[in-house]
Image (cartoon, grey):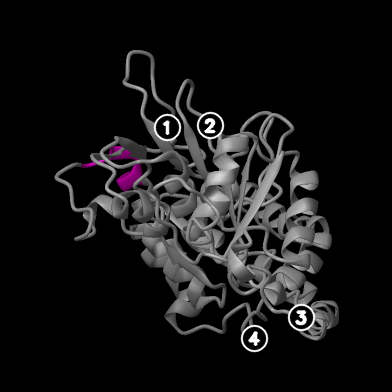
């Protein structure tokens, strides 16, 4: 830290001119095609196809679901109004009341809240992998429980042997594991505005199990048209949202390739300058880089220095769930807390730098690297 202090005068943090001169533009791929699709849905009408208890959704919902299932290699794709609703539908479909759920504490609450709301107990928070930051798989001799795992930052989780897995893939659209985009028992994707491929709000649940798929369709629509003694909710996607998301889905490969290109440039730059450990990609996996990370020494200083240079970087990611009042549990997960203290994050899903800004970001990284020597 003494070296950093001696060299810090060269950083904008200490009064110099920042390398990145203008705020990065916001990432946005919504345009004329999506506007045309929304208009078509409005003119075609009705705006929802769930009339009279129908569980299929309407022309645009069915079109989106059919195409999604084909693209992701699954039998069933079931749309919902959010990914959190999708996880809720998954938990309703399999029944989690009184059952043990093993999950990651290093995620946002929506990954785990549905199970807790439905009476799952206990909720066991595991630790995370020190390279991918996803939930560690169960080890030999450990009890096998229903698992809710999160593909953090866009890297696929390791699937947990002999466990029923609900995979929160909100951040990992088009990422692959062993050449597959979707191979958990239930995989849930997000169409939230903050995601790379989005319709404002939306969720998509994928499974190859016919019974689970039918239960999820019923759960999203009040459990109507069924004599089974269960209750459902209104968790439905509208026709306008489905029409927009379909257009986005047709551009998904191009969109994700653009996100990967930016993240890989940042990784190459950080590696060349020996700033720390950029995102790790496990063998036989691909990464969609929802968030780009750098694990480094003196992470707090590094975050402040890059931010001062105009690069929108922050320290850490989220407060571990076991520290929140709702989930508060007297535990500590070593890798989770080490990771939160040692990574800096760039929201690749939020910003879309120009070529000139990428050059300026390179200059910022070089200035920080120089000051850290």
Q: Nearer the viewer, mark 3 or mark 4?
A: 3
Q: Is residue 326 above or below residue 311?
A: above
Q: Give the image location of residue 286, x and y in percent.
A: 69, 40
Q: Residues within 10 Å of mark 3 (few under 14, many from 20)?
A: some
Q: Is residue 44 magenta?
A: no
Name the residue that disc number 4 marks. Answer: 22
Tell me what residue is drawn at x 77 percent, y 76 percent: 356
Query: On the picture, is 320 further left or further right than 263?
Result: left
Q: Nearer the viewer, residue 33 or 366?
A: 33
Quarter of the image where one finds residue 120: top left
Q: Which quadrant does the N terminus fall into?
A: bottom left
Dot 3 or dot 4: first in sequence order is 4
Segment tinted magenta in the rendering: 332-338
Q: Residues within 10 Å of mark 2 (few under 14, many from 20)?
A: many
- Mark identifier at residue 136: 1
Q: Nearer the viewer, mark 4 or mark 1?
A: 1
Q: Nearer the viewer, residue 224 or 94?
A: 224
Q: Disc 2 versus disc 4: distance between alpha carbons? A: 39 Å
**Secondary structure under the numbered disc 2 in the rendered image:** loop
Name the residue that disc number 3 marks. Answer: 45
Tell me what residue is drawn at x 72 percent, y 39 percent: 75
């Amino acid at each position: 830290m003494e070296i950093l202090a001696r060299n810090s005068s060269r950083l904008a943090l200490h009064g110099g001119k920042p390398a990145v001169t203008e705020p990065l533009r916001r990432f946005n791929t919504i345009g004329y095609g999506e506007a045309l699709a929304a208009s078509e849905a409005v003119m075609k009408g009705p705006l929802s196809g769930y009339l009279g208890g129908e569980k299929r959704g309407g022309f645009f919902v069915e079109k989106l679901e059919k195409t999604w299932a084909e693209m992701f290699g699954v039998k069933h794709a079931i749309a919902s109004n959010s990914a959190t609703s999708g996880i809720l539908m998954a938990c309703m479909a399999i029944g989690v009341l009184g059952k043990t759920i093993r999950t990651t504490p290093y995620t946002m609450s929506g990954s785990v809240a549905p199970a807790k709301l439905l009476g799952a107990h206990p909720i066991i928070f595991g630790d995370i992998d020190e390279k991918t930051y996803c939930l560690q798989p169960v080890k030999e001799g450990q009890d096998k429980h229903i698992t809710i795992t999160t593909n953090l930052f866009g890297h696929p989780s390791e699937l947990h042997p002999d466990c029923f897995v609900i995979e929160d893939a909100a951040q990992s659209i088009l990422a692959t594991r062993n050449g597959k985009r979707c191979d958990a028992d239930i995989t849930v994707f997000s169409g939230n505005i903050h995601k790379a491929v989005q319709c404002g709000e939306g969720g998509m649940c994928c499974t190859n199990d016919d019974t689970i798929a039918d239960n999820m369709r019923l759960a999203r629509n009040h459990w109507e048209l069924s004599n089974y003694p269960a209750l459902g909710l209104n968790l439905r996607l509208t026709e306008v949202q489905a029409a927009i998301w379909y257009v986005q889905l047709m551009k998904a490969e191009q969109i994700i390739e653009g996100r990967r290109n930016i993240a890989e440039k940042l990784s190459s730059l950080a590696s060349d300058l020996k700033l720390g450990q950029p995102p790790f990609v496990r063998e036989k996996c691909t990464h969609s880089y929802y968030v780009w990370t750098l694990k480094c020494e003196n992470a707090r200083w590094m975050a402040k220095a890059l931010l001062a240079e105009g690069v929108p970087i922050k320290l850490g990611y989220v407060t571990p769930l076991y520290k929140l009042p709702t989930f508060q549990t007297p535990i500590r997960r070593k890798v989770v807390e080490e990771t939160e203290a040692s990574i800096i994050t760039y929201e690749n899903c939020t910003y879309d730098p120009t070529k000139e800004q990428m050059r300026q970001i390179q200059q910022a990284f070089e200035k920080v690297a120089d000051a850290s020597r």
